[in-house]
Amino acid sequence: MRSTILRISIMVICVLTAVAGVQAAPPQREKQVVYGITPWTGKEYGGTFAPKGIDKIYLLADSNNVINTLETEVYFWPITNEYMANWFESREVVEGRLQILQDGKEIMVLERQPYNHYYPDGFYAGTSELLIGEEAEKKLQEYRDAIEGYWQAVSEYRQAYADYEQQMSEILKEVTETGKTYTEDELPKPPEQPTPPIWYATEVTEGFIVNLPVGEYVIRTIDDGGNVVEGTEKKLKVFDKRRSGIGYQIIPESKWTRPVQSDDATQILYMEGSRTMYLKAFYESEYNQHDFLKMTSLEQPLAGEGATSAYMWVHEKEVPSSIKVQVLQGGEVIKEAEYKPYYVKQTPGYALGYEIIEFDPEAEEFAGRRPSFEAVKLELGPGSYEIRAVDSSGRVLDGSVRSIRSINVVPMWQLYLLSLLPLAAGVVVVIRRRRMRGQTAKSVSA
Amino acid sequence: MSKMQYRANAINVIARRDIKSTVNGLGIYVVASLAFLVSMLFVRSNLKGVTENGLMVMVNPLNFPFFIAVTIGATYLALTSTMSVSRERDQGTLEVLFYGPVDSVAYIMAKFLEQLVTFLGLVIVYMVIFFVISKLTNFGMDGSFAAMAGLSVLLAASIVAFGLLLSTLCRSARTSVILLLVLLVLFLAVDIVAGILNSMSAKDMSVTLVYVRVAVDMLNRGLQWISPFGYLNRGMGAMNLGSAKLILSSIGASLLYTIVLLALAMRFLDRRGVRK
């Protein structure tokens, strides 16, 4: 009996081990020639690639996009339904030029150009710029110089700080020994710590810079002899925005982590009673959802599928903080609010949980803190309003007008009663007609 | 009297008689109330959404309830026109009419105009009641609502023409009514489901839902030139974009669609004849 249990246990363990081995099997990798793509998305530079199984690339019109012909290992990752490239272990540049054709005719042949990305507000903030050719080399050198300068400044600071500490300890010793006192002005000032450069420039690399007008194209990589490199012919769709405007992100005071969005003038903001809200305005563009999602996530074969007739707004960048928001009622400006920094302060207890207060960098309570967000604060009572964004010269920004309406909460029976009005009218018509018919019949029989 | 004058006279007489019959019957009033009751459910849902969330961004919240009311009204009119053509054929009225100065053009046009005039009356009632709802709730009646009201007439025209075509195509009244209802429900369902799927964030979609969206999108693209709702959507899209060229082309396409359906209805009536 005991040996039977042992045998069954061993078999179960063997089966489980085999199954576990099957589940953990790495996906099949295949060496492929792919296009590495860095598309301009209207807001930033993205990153995607076109493996063998994807035959069409999408790019935005009249903007610099980077395409590179590379050889790498590609595998399909079924968990997220996307192709993955093993860039870290396998990445070889496929030499050649990029030939672009339209209607079967060659319209241009591109050579690889040196380029890099420049992040004026740092790698993790703001947008990046694509620098091409000498400009890229120059910016990278500037960055290297700035970093070198920073380390030089740090070294000098350390030396200065050591000197300062030396001076201070001598003064302290003197004070202890002689009892001599020093005024604040007589004491040495500590050196200022240098700050590292916020901006960043990536290493210069080479790629094909593609900038085309709207249209359907075919691209392929050709070698020095003009022969097409196998597996490099793909269709290319270059598309543009359908329209642009100003979008608002509206942060309700009562739910600051759940903002709502108003992307065009048809999207009206409805509120109940008096409300306080914070508005952030963005420049935005509307794109075909299918094309845009394909452009940004080409490695995901399902991205944008079924959305060929849908459009989506993309918030590109925030409007400058010098922009003001005007509130109008009955066509007259009743309020004008400007961008201010706000801080979300957690409150103890069970009440709201937090309060949103204006951030004052000089105030002691905000020392060492940063504002939670910058926005325009609006406090509106019941009524119908219009809002619009105006620049410093008072010009209304195109597409920035929105309606804000407070609703009246009416008992539903009033609306249902209203619905029955046609039925009541019908009953009256039918009764009247029957009476008339009755009178006609009487007069005929009389 | 020329042939055209005879035709105009016949259209006038038949249309007047049928309008009078519709206005004096209880059906149109019941349908109008039913349409409002269904619409009110959507108005209620929008009101509840705002009161629960405090702040809510919506495209005119009266547009969809109005669209539902228009669809119910137009479908009813299409059904009545379908049934009346079949009934008049079954009862021999059609044959008697065609012995006189009535031909397929006059008959179909009269039926079409009757329903269109009735629908115009219905739209006016709709607009008055929606105006009252707008005042009660403060849900605004903006330009998109006016556009919807204007385009709803074209929608009703195409639905009625569609109904007339089916009534001349099918052998029995029952078949034409069932076919009309099935097709309109299909068109509407595809339109609404496509709208919902398109408004969903692509990131939150499961693989199954993506495949459903692909299938619905393909179906929707196939139906957009057949379904009357496809023409309405194009018109609304053009109005939102504010493009005069697109607005005119969508109106033109909708009118052309209606004319083609009416012409086909006349042709099929001629081919099938007026006898039972």
Image (cartoon, coloured by chain):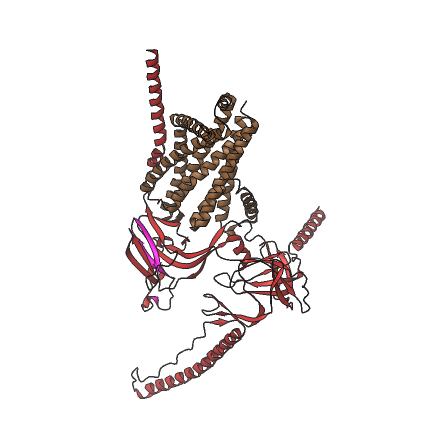
For this view, does A351 lie left or right of residue B197?
A: left
Q: Is residue B188 visible?
A: no
Q: Is residue B144 above or below residue A54?
A: above
The residue drawn where x is 38% and y is 55% is A250
Q: Residue B107, percent across and down?
A: 48, 28
For this view, does B54 lie left or right of residue A291?
A: left
In the picture, which quadrant includes the N terminus of chain B?
top left
Q: Residue A254, percent across and down?
A: 36, 53
Q: Is residue B50 visible?
A: yes
For this view, does A219 lie left or right of residue A250?
A: right
Which residue extends farthest top? A446
Judging depth in this view, the residue of A435 and B203 nearest the camera is A435
The residue drawn where x is 39% and y is 29% is B29
The residue drawn where x is 48% and y is 79% is A151
Judging depth in this view, the residue of B49 and A215 nearest the camera is A215
Q: Is residue A389 on the magenta stretch?
A: yes
Judging depth in this view, the residue of B241 and A31 nearest the camera is B241
Which image quadrant for residue A244? bottom left
Q: Is residue A59 on the magenta stretch?
A: no
In the picture, which quadrant includes the C terminus of chain B?
top right
Shown in brown, the chain is B
Q: Residue A50, percent across and down?
A: 60, 59
- Residue segment shown in magenta: A366-391
Shown in red, the chain is A
Q: Residue A375, percent across and down?
A: 36, 60
